[in-house]
Image: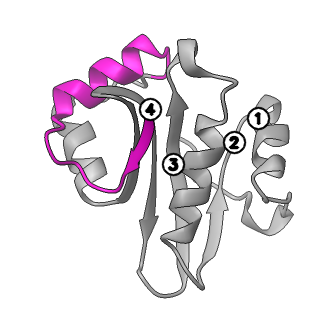
Amino acid sequence: MLTIRDNLEGVSGEMLKAFNVAADFCNGRTPEQYARAFANSVVRLAYDGDKLVGMARAVTDGVRCATIFDVCVAPAYRGRGIGKALMRSLKDGLPGQFVALICEDDLRGFYADAGFVPDMRVTMIVPD
């Protein structure tokens, strides 16, 4: 049975990194960096029983604006609505806020289905 949690209880940086590596979603962050990033975020974690199968997080000022990052579902669980459930739960946890995200072109349909629309006002970034 799928459950979505809004806390990091029992989740380590090593677990977060291992999940992202297994999902081919790792960007080279260390376990410590994963732990710090998620600890400083509004988080949603999807579980099938005790198994972590999806994650999403948002960084927010808690009042006006938030940005969503690290939306990821385990490959074997994709196409089951888990990503949409994570996004719905995350957005519900950010009431009244302007919510933005940056995504790859091939994910625009997924985010459109989750209620997002393209907005060229939020596409400026500082390159790595």
**What segment carries the magenta color?**
1-25
Q: CA distance from mark 2 to mark 4?
A: 29 Å
Q: Is residue 22 magenta?
A: yes
Q: Which residue is mark 2?
A: 103
Q: CA distance from mark 1 to mark 4?
A: 26 Å
- Specify the quadrant of the image occupied by residue 41: bottom left
Q: Position of residue 104 (x, y in %)?
A: 73, 35
Closer-to-camera residue (119/71): 71
Q: Is residue 87 left or right of residue 110?
A: left
What is the crowding at mark 2: few (fewer than 14 residues within 10 Å), some, or many (at least 20)?
A: few
Amino acid beneath label 2 = Cys
Q: CA distance from mark 3 to mark 2?
A: 9 Å
Nearest to N terminus: mark 1 or mark 4: 4
Q: Which residue is mark 4?
A: 1
Which residue: 41% across, 81% down? 62
Rendered position, 83 above or below 62: above
Q: Is residue 55 magenta?
A: no
